[in-house]
Image (spheres, helix red, strand yellow):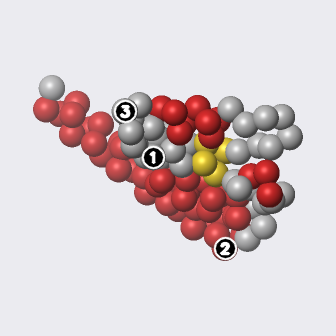
Amino acid sequence: MAAHTTHPVIGVPIVAGSLQGMDALLSTAMMPPGIPVATVAIGGAENAGLLAAQIIALGDPALAKAVAAEREARLQKVLEADAEVREKW
């Protein structure tokens, strides 16, 4: 796909086969010079979606605000989980 467009391409390797997606990860990440592909973790579709939103948000201020709000919400969840662990232990 990346060789046939100048649009950003995000590769999402999936868990499959005997190598559990490692082959897909390597083939996506190791594109030849001139054919860039952003690659997320194996099974990283959620991060791929967030990355796509960040790219689109570069030209869309309303989306940029939504992306920032989502990032802040995720930060708060992590801080809450951390506080729970610290309280328990």
Secondary structure beneath dot 2 equals helix
Residue assigned mark 3: 18
Mark toward the viewer: 3 or 1: 3
Q: Is residue 9 visible?
A: yes
Q: Residue furthest left?
A: 88
For mark 1, what is the residue?
14
Q: Which mark is residue 85?
A: none
Which residue is nearer to you in this view: 6 or 55?
Answer: 6
How many numbered markers are drawn?
Answer: 3
* Residue 26 image point, x, y percent: 58, 32
- What percent of the width, then of the height, locates residue 77? 35, 50
Asked if marks 3 and 1 touch (Cβ < 8 Å), the reply is no
Q: Residue at x 30, y 45 (%)?
A: 80
Instruction: Indicate the secondary structure of the residue bearing disc 1.
Output: loop
Residue at the far front in the pictured view: 18
The outermost residue toward the top is 89
**Badge 2 or badge 3: first in the primary sequence:** 3
Amino acid type shown at disc 1: Ile
As drawn, 21 above or below 89? below
User: With 12 as the anchor, is 4 left or right in this view?
Assistant: right
**Is residue 72 something that shows in the picture?**
no
Report the quarter where the C terminus lies. top left
Q: CA distance from mark 2 to mark 1?
A: 31 Å
Q: Is residue 57 left or right of residue 32?
A: left
Residue 19 screen position, x and y as percent: 41, 31
Q: Amino acid at mark 3?
A: Ser
- Residue under the point 83% across and 34% down: 33
Crowd tier of the residue under label 1, counting other residues whose Cα lies within 10 Å: few below 14, some 14–19, many 20 or above: some
What is the distance, in whole Å, between disc 2 and disc 3 at their CAs?
43 Å
- Residue located at (57% from left, 67% from top): 66
